[in-house]
Amino acid sequence: MNDYQHISLLLIFRIIFEITFFVIFFWVSREYLVKFLRDLKWRKRLIFYIPIARNIFWFFYAFYIFSYLINVNVILAGITFIFLMLIFWKSIINLIYGVVYKIQNGNVFGSQITINEFSGIIVSLKNTKMEVETEAGKIFQFPYVSLFAQKVSIPTVGKSLLVNFKYELKDQLSQQDVFNLKKQILCSPYVINPSALSVEVYNIELKKMLSIKLLVLNSKYIDSLKSHVDAQCEKLVN
């Protein structure tokens, strides 16, 4: 039996099954399992860190498969490695830099960032690139590798502002309604410090009122934040 025959159909199906299983596992973990957490702070942390753990896992899994191919057939392993590097080189490098950047800086989603002379709000931290929205509403994409070669600064939240939005409610809100509302509000990149988010329902005369307090990085983002909160409260208010 030659080396090529060691790579049986059973092995190929096993690898396909493992890849499928772990893809589904990480997807279900991020999209569904975290929803069982009632603590929104931990929920947001896991949504951020699960993709990092997933990417690190795939690095080791790829190394495991490559090591196995080397033991089976060095030429086949070399051809596979060169082919993947030629096709996915930029994506692989940005994926690695993305993991390093996220571990070094933490969850900077919603932070203001300055890259050389460019400034905006971080609205997405993808696997291979970061998306930044300007005051004009335009979104620009920056590969992670470029962030290590440019002057980048992220201000602290020390100058953040506390804003309070108030609405008149149609009906009383349940605890689940309040929880869901918080979850939707935290989807906005303009909200900083999730633990500072406060959603309260109170009565004033014969009216039921909803008060939402949260921190925003800068006054120039209040209008965008209010539009997001208004959209989430639309079905709840008069």
Image (spheres, helix red, strand yellow):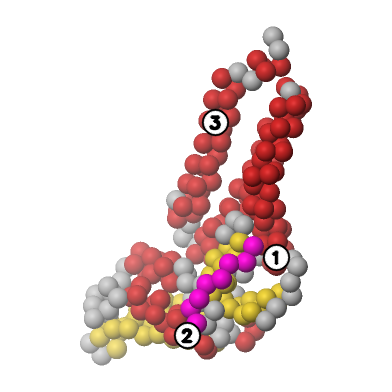
Q: Nearer the viewer, residue 210 or 203?
A: 210
Residue plotted at (36% across, 85% down): 166
Q: Which label lies toward us, 2 or 3?
A: 3
Which of these two is toward me, 83 or 208? 83
Q: Residue 195 in the image: state x and y as whole percent.
A: 54, 72
The residue at the far top in this view is 1
Q: Magenta stretch?
A: 136-143
Q: Position of residue 105 (x, y in %)?
A: 69, 66
The kind of residue tagged 3 is Ile
Distance from disc 2 to disc 1, alpha carbons, whole Å, reads 30 Å
Query: Can residue 140 be found in the magenta stretch?
Result: yes
Q: Which residue is mark 2?
A: 222
Q: Secondary structure at mark 1?
A: helix
Residue 99 visible, this orientation: no
In the figure, is residue 229 to the left or right of 144? left
Q: CA distance from mark 3 to mark 1?
A: 34 Å
Quarter holding residue 204: bottom left
Question: Which is nearer the N-term, disc 2 or disc 3?
Answer: 3
According to the image, label 3 marks what residue?
16
Q: Amino acid at mark 2?
A: Ile
